Amino acid sequence: MTLGKRRKLLNSHTGLDTTVRWRFVVAMAMNIPTLLRYGAHEPVGSPTVLHGIHIGLLAIYAVLLAIAHRRDAREDDRDSPRSMVSRFLTRVSRPEVIFVIAGLVFCWFEALIAMVGLALSLIYVLRGYLLLVQSSIIPSGLVFIGSFVIFIAAGTGLLMLPAATPAGNSIGFVDSVFTITSAISQTGLVVRPTGDGFTRFGQIIILIWIQVGALGVVVFGALLAEVIGTGFGLKATQTIAEGTEQGWAGQLSLQKLVIFTIVITHAFELLGASILYIGWPESWLGDPSDFASAGDRFYHCVFFSVSAFCNAGFATTESSMQGLRTHWTTHTVLIPLIVLGSIGFPVLANIREVIMARIRRRFVDGDRRLIRLNLNTRIILSTWVGLYVFGFLLIFLGEITQADQPGALALLDAHFMNLNRTSGFDTIAPQEMGVLSRLVLIFLMFCGGAPGSVAGGIKLMVLAVLVLTVWSTLVGRAETEVYGRTLPDILVRKCATLIVLVLAVIMSCSAIVAYNEQHIGLEPIIFEVTSAVGTTGLSMGITSELSTPSRWAIIVAMFLGRVGPFAVFAALVSITRAGRAQYAYPTESVVVY
């Protein structure tokens, strides 16, 4: 299809008019004075002139909004037939009206008008995103990948603004792409220290992109499932590594899914920040340089809380959590946040449902049994416990026998670094750990977190399905069984496919880095690439030493580690919807061993 035909189809599908296009242009233009005013250490141009331009653009938008409102009123009177997508994209929304009125009433506040311009721009970005998702112009998988690419491009530009880095220490294009990709993929690998290498403005950009990357996948899954239908269920559109095809659509409505995810995320982040604010000492070795005032202290607490729950691992301290290696907040606040973020929103929702059923004595429909944990939750929790015990024992053994750590410190490190397999914080530098401990960490980073979570890796469900399949084969079972249920063969094939794809990415990126960094040993390279693909963020200290080609390889590894499985599964969903093949080839066995 040619570009002209696509544009014609897009316009006919949405019914966009000139007023909508001009509103979009004006909303985007309102960000230009904001960048000139706040994007540099000193305003580019007169602040008074920039403020006047802001007010003028807002007034133009208000006029266009009034014209559009009159048009909507006339069409409502005529009961004009329009598609749902067209109505959503063209009608004047209540948030638009609220933002414009607030900006006009408080127009003397330059920062408020800047926020209004940003909010209006985001409204149109969301509308365009919904349009692409709900139309057949672009495949859904490409829409998802493209949304990440656009966010990375926008974040890269913002990080390259002079105000994002200290004066005289600007960041280059490749390093900016690396940092923002690491943030939006919740990885945590850095080429410059987050605390000293960025200003407060730059740190806030990183924090926003961490949050967007964590919530964006869930929101996309909800939108994609709404468009595709209920063939695979909502949770199935969020990840290839699902333990059951009865997903979110059978547990919560689409609206409740998004609300639950947003509320539970920010509730845990706020709770974690509050406890850190109370529990952190006044100072410690490697603490943030600006940690004196109460406002600065709360800011860093929020940063760490968000970074922990989103499993990002970014730290504004000099050496991650090594300065608080034995402090109680590290092990009783950050670790629970990391676990809650990596256990998966489907599991959290099911646990909440079970707890509320116990409190309210709510029974299963047509039965006298209380609501229980579903199959997905039981497999995830069992796998999590088994992996924790396995990792804890081996890391402890490596620390005691190879790193010569005291028993008490080895216990704390084994607990923290084991559960930190999905985040990039560390209480001890990985290069200071024993070889056995690092080997276990590579395996743990490869496994990652639960499906439908903010963590990366192959996912706990994939690991569980493959282990169960191996066990079933060893005991002579024809099918994969667990908890009195049989898992479908298609699920086993998807899990095997994902493992092969992830291993292929690790080997390919490792080969590129090994070719360009011949002075670095193989172990640090494998560790670094696995951490990138698993979106973990742990490193043996080689990140800042990598050459430009190697940094691009790590960027690709982080990107594919975050969006690859989702994009693959979106394509599988589209193929499945087209229908199954109506023929089969004859069966013939081959030699396996």
Image (cartoon, grey):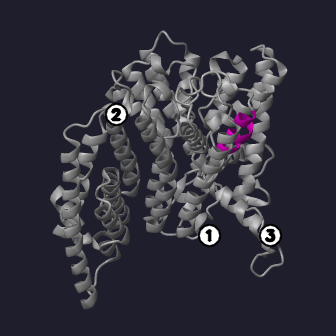
Label 3 Cα neighbours within 10 Å, binned few <14 / some 14-19 / many ≥20: few
Task: Indicate which disc residue 334 carries.
Answer: none
117 or 503: nearer the viewer: 117
Kindly report which numbered mark, 2 or 1, lies closer to the viewer in this rendering.
Answer: 2
Residue type at mark 2?
Ala
Q: Which residue is mark 1?
A: 250
Secondary structure, mark 3, is helix
337 drawn magenta:
yes
Q: CA distance from mark 1 to mark 3?
A: 22 Å
Residue at 45% x, 29% y: name it. Answer: 554
- Residue that carries the numbered disc 2 in the rendered image: 163
* Residue 429: quadrant of the picture: top right
Mark 1 and mark 3 lie on one chain; the one further toward the N terminus is 1
Magenta-tinted stretch: 328-338
Compute the Cα span from label 2 to label 1: 47 Å
Q: Quadrant of residue 130?
A: bottom left
The answer to whether any part of residue 2 appears in the image is: no
**Residue at numbered disc 3:** 359
Q: Position of residue 11 (x, y in %)?
A: 21, 67
CB under 8 Å between discs 1 and 3: no
Question: Which-is-in-front pick, marks 3 and 2?
Answer: 2
Query: Where residue 435 appears, x then y in whole percent?
Result: 69, 17
Q: Mark 2 or mark 3, which is nearer the start of the sequence? A: 2
| Separation of marks 3 and 2 at Cα, in angstroms | 51 Å
Residue displayed at 52% across by 32% down? 532
Name the quadrant of the C terminus: top right
Tally of numbered discs: 3
Q: N-terminal of the two: label 2 or label 1?
A: 2
